[in-house]
Amino acid sequence: MRILLTLIVLAILLPVFVWILHSLTIHYGIHANKYSLLDLAFWGGLITWAQLTKVRLPFFASFSHAYLFSMSAILLFPPWLAPILVAFFFVNPNMRARNYTWYKDLFNRLQTGLSVALAALVYWSVTIYLPIQMAGYDATQAFAIIAASATSFTVNISLVSLVVNLSTGLPFREIWFHNFGWVLASYLIMSPVVLLLARLYTASPPLLGNWGGWSVILFLIPLYYARFHWDEVVKLQEAFNKTVDLLSNTIDARDSHTFLHSERVTAIASALARAYGLDTAQVQAIEKGSRIHDIGKINVPDAILFKPGPLTQEEYEIVKKHPVYGVRLLEPAADYLGDTFDIIKYHHERWDSRGYPEGLAGQEIPLWARIVGLADAYEVMTAGRPYQKAKSPEDALREIEDLAGIQFDPGLVKIFRRIWESNPSWRNREVFLRLYSSKVPSLVSSLQPPLGPGSGTSRKSS
């Protein structure tokens, strides 16, 4: 029902903004460039082609050149026409797939058209009301296209995140930042290309042949090659990730207590890293490392790993080697996973130096390992083990706070409490399992271009 309501709202908003843009066109006499059916068909065809050749990315996103053509339409056609053109020529490459539904296609058309409509409104508002001079040059158009790009990005990503939130129950903020935060840079960096495409098409005389479209097509050849190259990179990375995930899942799936352990640790560590203020690249590296932080347990015998009672000192010494085992196991993939080795090796170190494998203390422990170590401890506390009853989220939080400055970085513990109080999806394990055990619906497709041990021989969390 909420998704249907969202569709109705979008279906109302898009015509409203088209009407506003039409009024703006009439009032200020904006005609952009003269256009014909050939112009509409050409740019509409480019939008369709971009959708058919887009590259799938993780977390509901995709990369394509449709953004370039949509923004170019704002410069080439009257403001009111650009969103109509984009919505009309939008095509879902999965139309013949079994999971295709009409409301997914309608949502994508409406939200894409609305993002372009608002971008057009911003572009022409800046052009009309905010002329900008820099060092004697008119920089209005450049500034306007950057502002329009930021607007298109914000509307697009927010609507997509909203619908994923309605479909899955995942927190809106978590979806927005975790899945799509890195896309903004691509939008802004590609803004000059939008101006270039528009200039190539309207150059008089044409730079190639007797029609500006030939120049645009020639320019698109390297863009298509870049898209093809990126597609191969994504496929290779996905294959590698699946291989690593398979190894990690081999451990998680063998016991009900560790089911989705790595996924939940990753969600917690990612939230901690973002709240700490780390940049997107660092957050993604932490997510990658936390996903495979226990990979070394493959070398730990099952008789020890799943022993229901206390470990002997000898058995515990074997368990303590799993961080080192993990790094050794992944050394052949150091070019891709080298930035995660500190996480894998040091996530069981303690603030008071009583951890393993090297007994590091305080700031000596790499920050990323401290983040994943705290996330790992909370997950273990609330999941329980055969030898330890699961704690409630409230009890686990109290224990983590009691161990601040002893086992955990006290600064991270304060951040952890602040995030915990916002009731994220990972706070309650049962909620997390319910959300992640089922396949997340692919509702959207139009978004363009991650207790430590003490002394003694009793069973320790590992």
Image (cartoon, grey):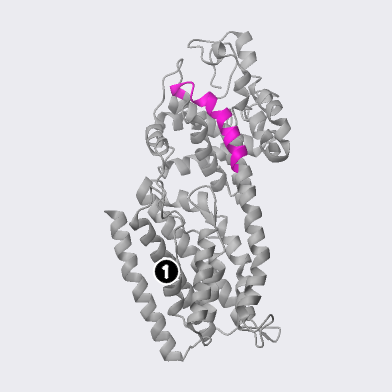
Which residue occupies the foreground of this view, 336 or 268? 336
Q: Main secondary structure of the magenta part?
A: helix
Q: Amino acid at mark 1?
A: Ala
> Going by the image, does 209 lie left or right of 150?
right
The C terminus appears in which quarter of the rendering?
Answer: top right
Q: Who's the residue at 61% across and 35% down the image?
A: 370
Q: Which residues are magenta?
A: 238-257
Q: Does 242 lie within the magenta span?
A: yes
User: Is 176 colored magenta in this rendering?
Assistant: no
Instruction: Tally the numbered discs.
Output: 1
For residue 219, which quarter of the picture? bottom right
> Can I make out residue 446 in this image?
yes
Please give the name of the residue rendered at 47% of the width and 59% of the height, measured from the top-left corner.
446
Query: Is residue 279 among the parts visible in the rendering?
Result: no
- From the viewer's side, name the closer residue of 191 and 378: 191
Q: Is residue 264 above or below residue 135?
A: above
**Above or below, 378 relative to 444:** above
Spot occupied by residue 430 in the image (x, y as percentages of width and height)? 37, 32
User: What residue is rendered at 54% in x and 57% in y?
Assistant: 54
- At a point 49% along the width and 21% down the height, the residue shown is 254
Q: In the rendering, at what x and y percent does residue 112 appear?
A: 44, 65
Quadrant of residue 396 in the image? top left
Sort mark 1 into few (<14), some (14-19) or many (20+) by Cα contacts within 10 Å.
many
In the picture as drawn, the residue positioned furthest to the left comes out as 1
Q: Position of residue 108 (x, y in %)?
A: 41, 61
Q: Residue 318: horizontal and vertical position, in percent?
A: 64, 14
| Circle 1: element type | helix
Q: Which residue is mark 1?
A: 87
